[in-house]
Image (tube, rainbow, N blue to C red):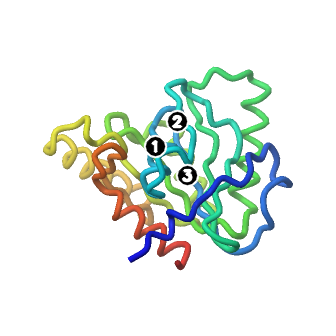
């Protein structure tokens, strides 16, 4: 079976919502704290090493990066948030852009929230899940860098995260994921394909 995500290609880095493609079709957005492995996860799902730029410097993704699969389906890499060393004015700008994007983007079918499996459910992660719940978006958590944990630690972390989600954000799902080891890539790919109806 052909992986439709291999067709993904970079289209634009948008600084404002007006620069995005027309609000039609279906798109899935990747969000998460700076340095959680967001770009690596996107590359692994699309089976393309250099699709989304990876940096060891937190906060390098400072635009909405759009990756179409075809004319009607897109992935969007949102700016990383957290301890990125960016000016306060830029932080405020992005807060407004992301708020408007999440509230008003009709074609947005779901959010993939990328969290380092060693540090899940920080304050920003909960904020994003609350955004998703309030806007009735599908949300799925990728617990990345799971290869840094033993199998037992990974399973315990996943169980704890799922328990918290069931209590606070019952519509949200979660899985272990490793972009280097490939663990969970097919599971994530299948779920996103379902959201996009491809």
Q: Check disc 2 and report the residue beneath it.
A: 54
Image coordinates of residue 160 in percent, x first then y, are: 27, 48
Query: Residues at badges 3 and 2 in contact (C-beta under 8 Å)?
Result: no
3D distance between C-alphas at marks 1 and 2: 7 Å
- Residue occupying the point 75% across, 73% down: 24
Q: Earlier in the sequence, mark 3 or mark 2?
A: 3
* Sequence-earlier tag: 1 or 3: 3
Question: How many dots with numbers?
Answer: 3
Q: Nearer the viewer, mark 3 or mark 2?
A: 2
Q: Position of residue 173 (x, y in %)?
A: 39, 61
Q: Is residue 90 left or right of residue 46?
A: right
N-terminal label among 1 and 2: 1
Element type where label 3 sits in the image:
strand
Residue 111, position in %: x, y?
55, 58
Residue indicated by mark 3: 30
Determine the secondary structure under disc 1: helix
Residue highlighted by disc 1: 40
Asked if marks 1 and 2 touch (Cβ < 8 Å), the reply is: yes
**Which quadrant does the N terminus fall into?**
bottom left
Q: Residue at x 45, y 39 (%)?
A: 37
CA distance separating discs 3 and 2: 14 Å
Is 2 or 149 nearer to us in this picture?
2
Answer left or right for 98 relative to 1.
right
- Residue 122 lies in quadrant: top left
Q: Disc 1 versus disc 3: distance between alpha carbons?
A: 11 Å
């Amino acid at each position: 079976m052909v992986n439709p995500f291999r067709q993904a290609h970079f289209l634009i880095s948008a600084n404002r919502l007006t620069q995005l493609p027309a609000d039609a079709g279906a798109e899935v957005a990747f969000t998460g704290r700076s340095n959680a492995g967001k770009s690596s996860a996107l590359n692994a799902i699309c089976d393309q090493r250099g699709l989304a730029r990876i940096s060891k410097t937190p906060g390098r993704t400072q635009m909405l990066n759009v990756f179409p699969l075809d004319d009607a389906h897109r992935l969007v890499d949102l700016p990383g948030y957290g301890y990125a060393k960016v000016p306060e004015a830029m932080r405020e700008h992005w807060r407004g852009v992301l708020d408007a994007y999440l509230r008003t983007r009709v074609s947005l079918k779901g959010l993939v929230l990328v969290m380092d499996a060693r540090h899940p459910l920080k304050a920003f992660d909960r904020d994003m899940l609350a955004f998703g719940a309030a806007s009735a978006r599908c949300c799925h958590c990728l617990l990345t860098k799971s290869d840094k944990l033993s199998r037992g630690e990974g399973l315990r972390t996943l169980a704890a995260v799922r328990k918290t989600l069931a209590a606070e954000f019952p519509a949200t799902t979660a899985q272990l994921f490793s972009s280097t080891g490939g663990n969970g890539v097919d599971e994530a790919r299948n779920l996103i394909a379902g959201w996009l109806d491809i």
